[in-house]
Image (cartoon, rainbow, N blue to C red):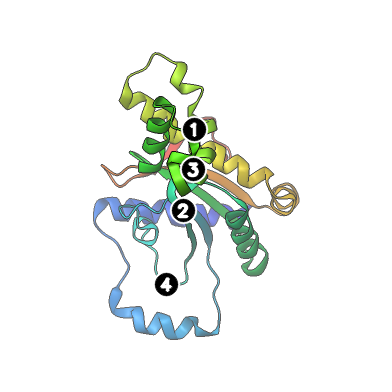
Amino acid sequence: MSKALDALTVLQEGNARYVEGTSHYDPALNAVERSRLLEGQSPIAVVLGCSDSRVPVEMVFDQGFGDLFVIRVAGNVVASSQIASVEFAVETFGVRLVVVMGHTNCGAVAATIDALKKNAHPESLGNLRSIVDRIRPAIEGLLNLNIEEDQLMEQAVRSNTRISTNSLKYGSSSLERMTEEDNLLIISAEYCLETGKVEFFDGVPNEDSSTST
């Protein structure tokens, strides 16, 4: 597990620098890094996150070229193509840390809440339906609760991230086996648009509750 935990520490420390405005990454080294990586790559972690333009994964963790294997899709949902991408990174590059990262005020989650509240006809959603249908299970139960809109959004984002993490863990026999036998760690995280902080939760070893960077 040490390889996964070492990678997690790097991400936590990088995010702390990002929040503090003391990032180490030097864009002047871009040309050097591009040249170095022509021979191959060895990312330390896979991050499956949302496509939202306000969540630039490498910047959030203060990482540069070749450090992270990033998969981005609206709502950080998990379908077969995302599972295959993670399998590829884990099996090809030996990555042992996979982070599924949602974020506050997620537009895809908000769109799903709106569609469910309006009981929108599936055909009216067009291709957005493929996203909504995957986020729907995270939200349906919450709509029956008597909670404020901001609380609904907060809980829906967290619930959606958990479901995506579980879909990744148990949607692949290969990944499930590696979590049990080969020290693969798949955990959830949430990026806060307001503060820039990443909170890791669900699956973090030796933690009974969520821990913040």
x, y percent for residue 21? 24, 56
User: How far apart are the alpha carbons under marks 4 and 2?
Assistant: 20 Å
The answer to which of marks 4 and 2 sits earlier in the sequence is: 4
User: How far apart are the alpha carbons under marks 4 and 1?
Assistant: 31 Å
User: How far apart are the alpha carbons under marks 3 and 1?
Assistant: 19 Å
Q: Dot 1 lies on which element?
A: helix
| Closer to the eye: label 3 or 2 | 3
To which residue does mark 3 refer? 129
Q: Quadrant of residue 158?
A: top left
Classed neighbour count for the residue bearing mark 2: other residues with Cα under 10 Å, few (<14), some (14–19), many (≥20): some
From where the camera sits, is residue 200 visible?
Answer: no
The residue positioned 33% from the left and 79% from the top of the image is 29
Q: Amino acid at mark 4?
A: Phe
* Dots 3, 2 in contact, CB < 8 A: no
Q: Dot 4 lies on which element?
A: loop
The answer to which of marks 2 and 1 sits earlier in the sequence is: 2
| 67, 173: nearer the viewer | 173
User: How far apart are the alpha carbons under marks 4 and 3?
Assistant: 34 Å
Q: Amino acid at mark 3?
A: Arg
Please, is residue 130 above or below residue 81 in the view? above
The residue positioned 64% from the left and 59% from the top of the image is 84
x, y percent for residue 176? 71, 47
Please, is residue 92 above or below residue 173 in the view? below
To which residue does mark 1 refer? 159
To which residue does mark 4 refer? 65
